[in-house]
Image: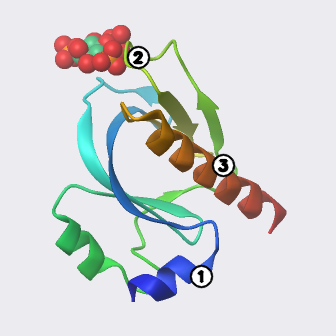
Amino acid sequence: LFMSCMHYFHVDLQGEYLNKAKISEGGKKLRKNWTSAWVVLCSGELHFYKESKQEALANLKPGCKPDGVNLCGAVIEWTSEKSSRKNVFQITTRSGDEFLLQSDDYATISKWHDAIKRAVDRSVNA
Ligand code: I3P
């Protein structure tokens, strides 16, 4: 199941733990609360899992979970202003949700930044 999802789009990424903060919902500002989330990029959607890696993998079916973040039309940009943390980028969805993703490891976060950006580009060109 996991492999079929990975190969669905070559832009997909296997899960990894990143720091995540949702800072707006539908354009309305939220109180920032950083949590560690298991992040999966699958078929043009981003999925965040709170629970174990095992649960994330068990839930990962072809076509993925229906409640992912839709990246179609999203804007991805590095930001040094939205957080005191280093290596932060922001995802702004078309519905006005804003997420920050962060890792202390630049190689890790830039890999996710680039993959998510490619998924957005692909959704626009699809
Ligand atoms: C926030 C918390 C966040 C911090 C945020 C604070 O305080 O310290 O970690 O974001 O800064 O407001 P609280 O827990 O009381 O809500 P960063 O770690 O990303 O800097 P901000 O208000 O400048 O976003």
C-alpha distance separating marks 3 and 1: 17 Å
Question: Residue flagged by tag 1: what amino acid is it?
Answer: Tyr
Which residue matches tag 3? 117
Q: Say which residue appears at 59% left-offset and 65% top-offset.
A: 44
Q: Position of residue 57 (x, y in %)?
A: 28, 76
Which residue matches tag 2? 83
Label 3 secondary element: helix
Question: Residue flagged by tag 3: what amino acid is it?
Answer: Lys
Return the residue nearer the eye: 28 or 64: 64
Looking at the image, tell me whether mark 3 or mark 2 is earlier in sequence order.
2
* Residue 24 visible, this orientation: yes
Marks 2/1 in contact by CB < 8 Å: the verdict is: no
Q: Position of residue 46 (x, y in %)?
A: 47, 58
Q: Position of residue 93 (x, y in %)?
A: 58, 44
Quarter occupied by the C terminus: bottom right
Label 2 secondary element: loop
* Residue 72 visible, this orientation: no
The answer to whether the residue bearing label 2 lies less than 8 angstroms from the nearest atom of ligand 1 is yes
Which residue matches tag 1? 8
Label 1 secondary element: helix
C-alpha distance separating marks 2 and 1: 34 Å
Q: For the image shown, how many numbered marks are present on the structure?
A: 3
Quarter occupied by the N terminus: bottom left
**Residue 85 figure quarter:** top left
Q: Say which residue appears at 49% left-offset and 40% top-offset.
A: 107
Q: Say which residue appears at 16% left-offset and 64% top-offset.
A: 52
Q: Residues within 10 Å of mark 2 (few under 14, many from 20)?
A: few
Q: Position of residue 20 (x, y in %)?
A: 34, 39
Depicted 97 relative to depicted 16: above or below: above
Q: Residues within 10 Å of mark 1 (few under 14, many from 20)?
A: some
Looking at the image, tell me whether mark 2 or mark 1 is earlier in sequence order.
1
